[in-house]
Image (spheres, rainbow, N blue to C red):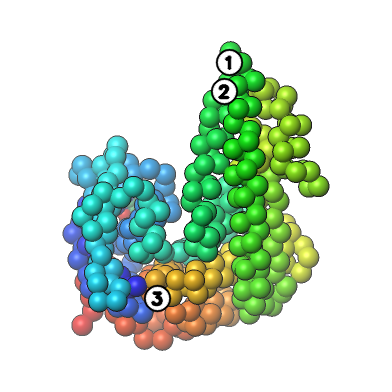
Amino acid sequence: MPLARVTVEQFRCLNAVDVALDPIYNLFVGPNASGKTSLLEALFLLGRGRSFRTRGFSKLVRQGETAFRVVGWVESGGLTTVLGVGGTRQSADIRIGGQPAAGAAELAAHFPPLIIDPEIHKLLEDGPHRRRRFLDWGVFHVEPTFMDTWQRYHRALRQRNAALKPGLDPRTARVWDPELIATGDRLARIRLEYLDILGPVLKALGGQLLGGEVGLSYQTGWTAGESLREAIDRSFERDCRYGATQVGPHRADVSVRVDGHVAKERVSRGQQKLLAAALTLAQLSVQESRHPGRSALLLDDPAAELDADNLGRLLAVVRTLPVQLFVTALRPDLPGLGKPGALFHVEHGGIRRAE
Ligand SMILES: Nc1ncnc2c1ncn2[C@@H]1O[C@H](COP(=O)(O)OP(=O)(O)OP(=O)(O)O)[C@@H](O)[C@H]1O
Ligand SMILES: [Mg+2]
């Protein structure tokens, strides 16, 4: 389901962009600060409803302007769907086929992009929040009930935490326990099922990219050997003290190991990037196998911090994936991916296709 055309107005340094895209491989070339990452950010926003660089929309509006808009034309089976994401410094507006969308997740049914950028090592280095988000994005694509389960769990969690605040009767918080436990158990189960699918794909890619044995393990967010019900019961006093629920899938994490060692304690920055890229490519591969012809990969400045061998290995894997590619580089001679279907020059907030 490739993105055939995109327009970007008043977004970061981009002024008025309107480009026809290649269904397979698009390469965006330009000097530092020309707007390459901003363009990928606009594409990410179109499929995910958020930026990968900043929270909220306030920094995305072009300086001196009041609102931005990104519009994309997605083609599938002879039909075109128009996706639109607009924003001011305070509010967002997501549209699909001209109609307001209920949420950002609806965009992803049409255009689900994944990104590999120079910050990708944060997936391993930062706290568990990023890894949970990574995991849940993957589960969302293989398990149709994920969204409903996730929303119900977080609604119960919010209500329970609100009732645990000082000055209220904490016993009322326990009204939410049955819903929290039912949806929390289910969330843990579907996450584990997804990791069972992802694991073998990652193992193969990890071997290719790092030459080591890459494995994943899931920490549920409560003590191993206990049921969620037991953990919630045991934690109640602590929950009251902290005014928030201390155990459950909202505290889960995924640990990544290379040859049996916890990756973030063991591998170099370059290897961390490769490993995080392997995770992303494994996820992309699973996503594409479930929904063929839909996925896109945004690859921002892949040459940054990878040596020639590692870059070659990464691009060799990327090349085999049947997804629409959007790649940025300082120069057009990026080795490994072959000739782009469309080459673009990015300069002074504008983008033009090379003849
Ligand atoms: N809201 C904004 N309004 C106007 N300009 C902005 C805004 N936000 C960021 N910029 C500017 O946009 C420019 C382009 O940034 P971007 O990160 O897209 O460049 P890039 O081509 O990816 O550069 P590099 O090769 O260094 O990664 C920067 O000079 C940045 O200061
Ligand atoms: Mg950049």
Q: Which mark is residue 163?
A: 2
**Residue in the picture at 57% in, 28% down:** 161
* Left or right of residue 104, residue 215 in this image: right
| Rendering coords of residue 46 (x, y %) | 33, 58
Nearest the camera: 233 or 259? 233
| Badge 1 element | loop
**Residue in the picture at 49% in, 62% down:** 141
**Residue in the picture at 71% in, 51% down:** 219
Q: CA distance from mark 2 to mark 1?
A: 6 Å
Labels 2 and 3 touching (C-beta < 8 A): no
* Left or right of residue 192, residue 333 in this image: left
Q: Quadrant of residue 292?
A: bottom left
**How busy is the neighbourhood of tag 2: few (under 14 within 10 Å), some, or many (20 plus)?**
many
Q: CA distance from mark 3 to mark 1?
A: 52 Å
Residue on which the image places disc 3 = 293
| Rendering coords of residue 235 (x, y %) | 73, 31
Hey, what amino acid is under mark 1? Leu
Vertical order, 167 against 129 (above or below): above
Labels 2 and 1 touching (C-beta < 8 A): yes
